[in-house]
Image (spheres, helix red, strand yellow):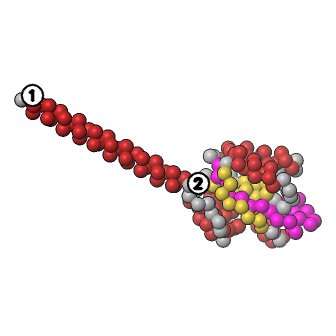
Amino acid sequence: MIRLKAACLFAGVCMLAQATTQMHEKVAATHVLYQQHTRKKLPTTDREAYDYCKQHKHAFIAIVWPIAQGNGEEIREIFKHYGKIIYKKQFFFDHKFAYKILKKAHPLVHDMDEHVDWYFPVGTYEKPARIFVLEFKNAETAIACKMAVRQIFKMQYRPIHVNDVHYETVELAEFFFT
């Protein structure tokens, strides 16, 4: 009888050890999958950037307007401090596109022609805007980042626009990347 109990106890310990080993293997495999997921390739084309923006609710579009030239390294450091740079491109505006994008970025502005002239004074259309796809934890972090960039240029809110909500990210991504 004692041998039977010992055999059952030994079998139970073996089954428990096997289950524990299997659980550790599953956890290790999950960890590897998570590491692979977090190291996904960043977008390298406009289409990939557009898809990224649609799929990631923490993606934001930052527009460094042509009026704010220079300070590229400082801007990148601020972006990295507050979040992650996912994609970058340059974009040249003409008056028509400047009007359209400013209307999208500032829908409540009624005197848009004056607004366009304020953002794009004479000679500005020859300079590129810098368009970034950024990833932030939340909208509050995006706002703090935008304020930090504005401090570099001392031009009120003209140097940069960062959208506020995800549907705006998708709209701006469609405008710039499709």
Q: Amino acid at mark 2?
A: Lys
Which of the pair 109/32 is nearer the observer?
32
Residue 77's place in the image compared with 95, above or below, is: above
Q: Which mark is residue 57?
A: 2
- What range of the chain is rendered magenta? 114-136
Number of disc labels? 2
Which callout, 1 or 2, points to the residue nearer the camera? Answer: 1
Q: Amino acid at mark 1?
A: Ile
- Place of residue 82 in the rendered image (x, y in percent of width and height, measured from the top left): 69, 45
- Asked if residue 104 shows in the view, the reply is no
Most distant residue in the top direction: 2
Question: Does 86 appear in magenta?
Answer: no
- Place of residue 107 in the rendered image (x, y in percent of width and height, measured from the top left): 74, 59
Residue that appears at 18% across and 38% down: 11
The residue that label 1 is drawn on is 2
Residue that appears at 76% across and 55% down: 161
- Place of residue 21 in the rendered image (x, y in percent of width and height, measured from the top left): 33, 43
Pointers 1 and 2 in contact (C-beta within 8 Å): no
Side (left or right) of 10 relative to 165: left
| Disc 1, SS | helix
Gap between marks 1 and 2, in whole Å?
62 Å
Residue that appears at 75% across and 47% down: 78
- Place of residue 14 in the rendered image (x, y in percent of width and height, measured from the top left): 23, 39
Side (left or right) of 69 relative to 91: right
Question: Does 130 appear in magenta?
Answer: yes
Residue that appears at 82% across and 65% down: 128
User: Residue 44 sits in which quadrant?
Assistant: bottom right
Q: Residues within 10 Å of mark 1 (few under 14, many from 20)?
A: few
Q: Earlier in the sequence, mark 1 or mark 2?
A: 1
Image quadrant occupied by the C terminus:
bottom right
